[in-house]
Image (spheres, rainbow, N blue to C red):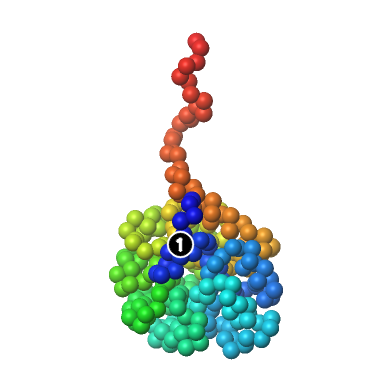
Amino acid sequence: MTEHDGLKIGSHVFQSRLIVGTGKYQSVEQTEQALTASGAEVITVALRRVELKDRSAGSLMNLVLSKRWTILPNTAGCYTADEAVRTLRLARELGIADIVKLEVIGDPKTLYPDNEQTLEAAKILVKEGFTVLPYCMDDPIVCRKLEDLGCAAVMPLAAPIGSGLGIRNPYNLRIILENAKVPVIVDAGVGTASDAAVAMELGCDGILLNTAIAHAQKPVLMAEAMRGAVVAGRKAFLAGRMPKRLYANASSPEAGLIE
């Protein structure tokens, strides 16, 4: 990597390619420790699941608004385009919505996104000047349509939200990466550091995760592991892996050996 190998989203450039969530931790103190250990520059906040007006010392909002990170407000818990748009308009009024994560859920059990509602909301939000990062299925067609609408990135899932199943369909991700002209950020399903490394080795531009850190036995240590995995995976992608071979290939060259 070079010092210029930053993640560019709209008008923003970040050196860290890891985006982390702020939910599910045991305490605000643990949240702060994990966010710091992750090295993330961008953190995401579920607007419908936090008390936005509580800015008191020790509150989550006090932490996330400390200007240490770029805030990525998200619409988790929204099931219609209208709900998502209204939620982000509110965030904009509160001064915390420049770059946003759009999430419109279609099913409460799988938490899979509703493609139709996501596209509808994205169209409105882009027109209103938001920098939109939509959570979506690992569907190359949906990703293309979101990009065509003007989304600044696409965020296909690797597996269901909070499942920790890892990269279930690397082939779809490869197709998305082959065609996308905006950053591709894997969102949902990463369970451990090797999952993050695999996604980055495929060529993904970034990783967004929450549960993998917050529900680890040692969240702060896992945050450090994720930080290293994203960096290592990116370096491996840029380096270009050796080709896979069916048979062995001697590590030492045979040319020049004395017979």
Q: Residue furthest front?
A: 3
Residue 102 percent across, percent down from the top left: 43, 76
Q: Nearer the viewer, residue 170 or 178?
A: 178
Taking the image as shown, residue 146 lies to the left or right of residue 167, namely: left
Q: Label 1 is placed on what type of residue? A: Leu
Residue 170 percent across, percent down from the top left: 43, 55
Using the rendered image of the protein, determine whether residue 87 is visible from the camera's viewpoint: no
Q: Is residue 105 above or below residue 82?
A: above
Taking the image as shown, residue 35 lies to the left or right of residue 170, namely: right
Q: At 36% across and 59% down in the image, what residue appears?
A: 176
Callout 1 secondary element: strand
Tell me the quarter of the picture where residue 63 sits: bottom right
Q: How many marks?
A: 1
Tell me the quarter of the picture where residue 123 sits: bottom left
Residue 121 percent across, percent down from the top left: 37, 80
Q: At 48% across and 73% down in the image, what residue appears?
A: 111
Q: At 54% across and 54% down in the image, what residue appears?
A: 231
Read off the residue under disc 1.
7
Q: At 48% across and 30% down in the image, what residue appears?
A: 248
Residue 33 percent across, percent down from the top left: 67, 68
Badge 1: residue crowd in 10 Å (few <14, some 14–19, many ≥20): some
